[in-house]
Image (spheres, rainbow, N blue to C red):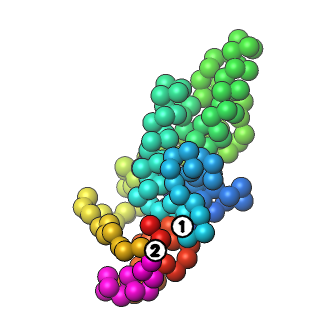
């Protein structure tokens, strides 16, 4: 599941789809609201790496609880829980198995789990594909710091002793040049 943002957005927190899904986990506006991701003129937590990751994991866990199967949960994440429920109902009415591989679904959703599995295979055994992936230590790479409301981002960057563009890259949820909450 940690690799799912690669499929969704290539790990780009600024990604926005044609249907207005945003962030590296590609939350739709309503789903983001359902998982307490603030969206207003000043910020969009769908693009906040920590907030959206927590929301995505909560959502995926809920979907798994709903369907009892990770393939169906992932299909629901991509296609929508209602669409998967309707496909399962259609299969039940037609006497067909109620499994991911037997559902009629759009090609994007049909290929969603195999894409994730392929990425997992590459990352877990890159040598089989003649790749060499860089080592990434399992340690904190940044920390969260509370800032006073109303501080502008340029000041926050200066106080953090980092260039503004780097500060903005680490804080992709801000839409305006001031911290509001």
Q: Residue at x 44, y 53 (%)?
A: 53
Q: Is residue 152 magenta?
A: yes
- Residue in view at x 70 percent, y 11 percent: 95
Quadrant the C terminus occupies: bottom left
For mark 2, give the secondary structure.
Answer: loop
Q: Give the quadrant of the N terminus.
A: top left
Residue 139 pos. (x, y %): 24, 61
Q: Secondary structure at mark 1?
A: loop
**Could you tell me how far apart the alpha carbons at marks 1 and 2 are, in whole angstroms?**
9 Å
Residue that appears at 51% across and 46% down: 35
Kindly identify which residue carries mark 2: 179
The picture quadrant where one finds residue 16 is: bottom right
Number of numbered discs overlaid on the protein picture: 2
Where 13 falls versus 31 (above or below)? below
Left or right? Give the position of 99 relative to 60: right
Query: Sequence order check: which comes first, mark 1 or mark 2?
Result: 1
Say which quarter of the image contains residue 98: top right
Q: Is residue 168 magenta?
A: no
Q: Nearer the viewer, residue 180 or 33?
A: 180
Q: Where does the image place residue 68, in percent across and percent down from the top left? A: 49, 25
- Residue bounds of the magenta highlight: 150-161
Q: Which mark is residue 43?
A: 1
Which class describes the residues within 10 Å of circle 1: few (<14), some (14-19), or many (20+)? many
């Amino acid at each position: 599941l940690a690799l799912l943002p690669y499929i969704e957005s290539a790990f780009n927190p600024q990604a926005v789809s044609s249907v207005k899904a945003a962030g590296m986990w590609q939350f739709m506006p309503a789903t983001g609201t359902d998982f307490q991701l603030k969206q207003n003129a000043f910020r969009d937590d769908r693009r906040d790496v920590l907030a959206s990751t927590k929301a995505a994991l909560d959502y995926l866990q809920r979907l798994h609880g709903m369907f009892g199967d990770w393939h169906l949960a992932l299909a629901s994440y991509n296609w929508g829980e209602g669409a998967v429920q309707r496909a399962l109902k259609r299969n039940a009415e037609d006497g067909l198995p109620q499994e991911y591989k037997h559902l009629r679904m759009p090609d994007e959703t049909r290929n969603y789990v195999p894409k994730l599995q392929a990425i997992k295979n590459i990352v877990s055994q890159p040598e089989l594909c003649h790749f060499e992936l860089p080592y990434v230590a399992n340690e904190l790479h940044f920390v969260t710091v509370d800032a006073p409301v109303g501080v502008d981002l340029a000041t926050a960057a200066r106080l953090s002793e980092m260039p503004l563009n780097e500060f903005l890259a680490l804080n992709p949820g801000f839409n305006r040049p001031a911290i509001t909450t």
